[in-house]
Image (tube, rainbow, N blue to C red):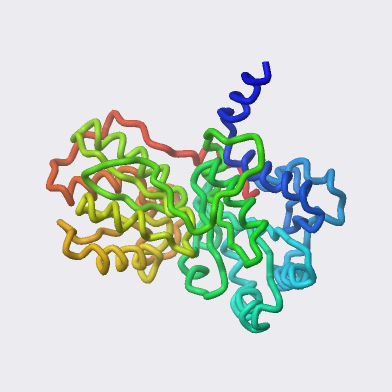
Amino acid sequence: MRSYLLIYMANRIITFEKAVNEAIFSEMKRDKRVFLFGLDVTDHKRIFGTTKGLEIFGNERFFGTPLSEDAMTGVALGAAITGLRPIHVHIRVDFLLLAMNQLVNMVATTSYGSAGKLKAPLVIRAIIGRGWGQGFQHSKSLQGIFAHIPGLKVVMPSRPSDAKGLLISAIRDDSPVIFLEHRWLYWTEGHVPNHPYEIPIGKSNILRKGRDVTIVATSWMNVEAVRAAEILSKKHGVETEIIDVRTIYPLDDAPIVKSATKTGHAVVADYDWEFCGFSAEVAARISEKCFNKLKSPVTRIAFPHVPCPTTRPLENVFYPNAVTIIREVEKKLGLRKSDLSEENFYSWENRFKGPF
């Protein structure tokens, strides 16, 4: 009986939302210094369900805040400096921009400015991505901006198991961590161990082995890349290697370089703007370190340089997806365009019923 139970616990399938919730709950239970606060965390929807059940820890460790991003980020920093481990939740990354003074000039420089005498062990969770016509003020990602700031770690999990392990690592880290969660990922499912565990921050993960082309992806683009790889294999016999960077900074580029050297073809699929974005950093590293091994120029797939649109037809053009990846790989490898009319692709707009 015990062996069956252990197998079930190790192989159970849960949602991304549940994995985030488990990580927070286990750390708040383990360490009394951990507390969670933010706008609408106590709302009945509980931030897509990720803050369910946390009221058990009392209103001193789980509470909502006023609509004041800059001030509340300052509260998080003050708490971290004095020995607590805050998790500050922003329901949209767009409005984290209101806290940039705190993040850039205070949070990111705390350790450096004190010669290492002070630490800022805080986690800022922020939700990214499209919803039901969220538009230009509610659909950004911005990982490139945060990764540009020395002193901040930036994490973007794409699978439930990574969400749990990376969030636990982030909470235990003595550095400030920006933890970005795509709203469409909350309903994805995967195998997640029942017990608490850490996944090291700064380690990429190979989602799929392949020999013909390398796709380096962030966040939701990994979901799209996996679907694209399945279709490319079926239609053309192309075997795609997919690397989920998981951590934007620090970036683990060793698996990326190794893969691009092997395949000779690389596509970077980033859920953010292309111009001056994270995809440019990855493309530059591949070009610098694999130049003599590349069979084609590194290609980038990301947002065009316009604001995030609101209407569904414009969203479908603006946001890259599996079809975008398939067409780019076909072009890169000199393949004919395959008929995709009978293929199914991910689209979860209808499941997204509101802002929280």
Which quadrant of the view contains residue 104? Answer: bottom right
Which residue corresponds to the image point at 28% horizontal and 50% vertical from the top-left?
214
Which quadrant of the view contains residue 109? Answer: bottom right
Residue 141 shown left or right of residue 225 in the figure: right
Which residue corresponds to the image point at 48% horizontal and 64% vertical from the top-left?
250
Q: Position of residue 326 (x, y in %)?
A: 26, 44
Residue 264 visible in the shown view? yes
Q: Position of residue 298 (x, y in %)?
A: 24, 60
Which residue corresponds to the image point at 51% horizontal and 43% vertical from the top-left?
159
Residue 49 visible in the shown view? no
Viewer-proximal residue among 201 and 46: 201
**Quadrant the N terminus occupies:** top right
Residue 183 shown left or right of residue 329 in the figure: right
Viewer-proximal residue among 52 and 111: 111
Q: How many marks?
A: 0
Q: Position of residue 25 (x, y in %)?
A: 73, 45
Q: Does residue 100 lie above or below 245 as drawn?
A: below
Q: Position of residue 160 (x, y in %)?
A: 55, 41
Which residue extends farthest top? 1
Q: Does residue 343 lie above or below 155 as drawn?
A: above
Which residue corresponds to the image point at 47% horizontal and 61% vertical from the top-left?
248
